[in-house]
Amino acid sequence: MTRGVGPLMAMVSIAWGLVWVASQVVVHPPLPAQTTLVVGLIATNLAILGYPSVLRGPRQRRRRRGRAEGDVASLVRLGTGTGALRQGLTPEAAERTVDLLQPLLGGDAVAITDREHMLAFAGPGADHHTPGSALWAPERERVLRTGRSAISTSVVCRHSGCPLRSAAFAPLTVGDEVVGTVTVYRQTATPPRLELVEGVAGVLSLHLELAGLEAQARLSTDTQLEVLRAQINPHFLFNVLNTIASKARTDPDETRQLLLRLADFFRYAIDQRSQFAEFAQEYFFVRTYVTLEQARFGDALRVEYDVDPQVLGVRVPVLMIQPLIENAIKHGLSRKVGRGTVTLRARVDPLASSLDILVRDDGVGMDAATLRSLRNGRRGGTGHGPEAFDDPADVPPLRRGGIGLRNIDERLALLFGDRYDLTVRSRESDGTDVRLRIPLR
């Protein structure tokens, strides 16, 4: 039986029983049936109106449940940073945040400020508490100065028509610095609960600190990308231009094609603004580079490609694969007598949800001292490479060190943390393998 129906039926039965006793037993002579019916209906209606029946109770519960679910959703969004201050203390982020906070904090209005201006306001008084307006409240000034929360039970606004009468102020901090405030207002003299406002301000302060760390990480990653651009070997450009010049008289068509390839190469390297691109784009960039190198080395350089087609749509860090190919040619093959081969292999590992890239050359390899320097320069820990090697000259996964690989490794660490492997295997006169494993995006 639906909750509330049983008590209501009992009340209606009791009402009709009282009406029957009063009209047929107590009163003499008994009242006519029509009069008894009218009195009974009046008593029934009074019972229904006076009791939270099934017609009203579930609706109220649904309304209460809807409000509660909305509050929980807002709290979850606040806790995860969705729509909160994870983009920094900006007017846009503040506006999204006050909309989240208003149903949570038990106040009539909510404001977020920096140290000098109102950033966002929601609730009664929004007509004059506008974004960009100057701050006025002695308690807020004290919060900004001391970093301690405060309550005001007096008029909190200079505007004569402001309906707000009390407020709770809590600081927004980044480290030890107070950067702004959260304010919750009420239209009565009873202020909001300070503990709740302080708790929310603490969550938002954490978001601001995370925003700062993320911005710093992005800046560092962008810096690494600029360094990669700057590391485009000037000797490579000089050598390619010499090659083009030498062919200008003997093969004008090839000269024109090489100039177009060179333009494509530098256009791609310079135009990249995102940290990631599809593997297909990086693959085209690699092949463009290889074409220019093969024009210089001729038959002495052979490059083989073993790329699974499903790899082409995977997003990878830009300007990441070409330097590995360049290292193989420059350090592996340029000092080798006779023909040398570089192999680029790429596979998706669906079980590990990762992309595996191998760059292999059959060049001169590295001596034990060079490989030990790689080990000494690694980021720390033993790591987990895709293979284990018994030769003392073999090196566990590379970490921030190595010939031409330091910048790549540092950038991978910024982009993926510990969720990548960069592993080098090399023996003198036996070539070098560089394996890169990154998570799928």
Image: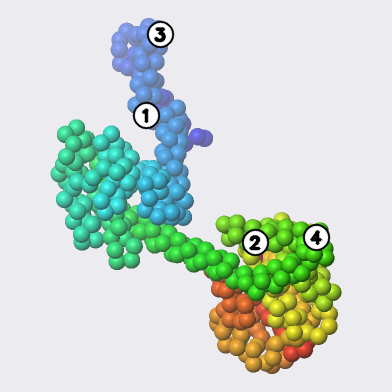
Which numbered mark, 2 or 1, is in the foreground of this view? 2
Report the coloring of the rendering: rainbow
Q: Amino acid at mark 1?
A: Tyr
Q: First in sequence: mark 3 or mark 2?
A: 3
Q: CA distance from mark 3 to mark 1?
A: 27 Å
Q: Nearer the viewer, residue 104 or 333?
A: 333
Q: Nearer the viewer, residue 394 or 17?
A: 394
Q: Secondary structure at mark 2?
A: helix
Q: Quadrant of residue 413?
A: bottom right
Left or right placement of residue 161 versus residue 177 in this view: left
Disc 2 crowd rating (10 Å Cα; few below 14, some 14-19, many 20+) is some
Q: First in sequence: mark 2 or mark 1?
A: 1
Residue 21 percent coordinates (x, y): 35, 18
Q: Residue placed at 43% from the left, 59% from the top?
A: 211
Q: CA distance from mark 2 to mark 4?
A: 21 Å
Q: Residue placed at 82% from the left, 77% from the top?
A: 300
The residue where tag 4 is placed is 252
Disc 1 crowd rating (10 Å Cα; few below 14, some 14-19, many 20+) is some
Q: Secondary structure at mark 4?
A: helix
Q: CA distance from mark 3 to mark 2?
A: 102 Å
The residue where tag 2 is placed is 266
Q: Amino acid at mark 2?
A: Phe
Quarter of the picture holding the C terminus: bottom right
Q: Which mark is residue 232?
A: none
Which numbered mark, 3 or 2, is in the foreground of this view? 2
The residue where tag 3 is placed is 33
Residue 91 visible from this viewpoint:
yes
The residue where tag 1 is placed is 51
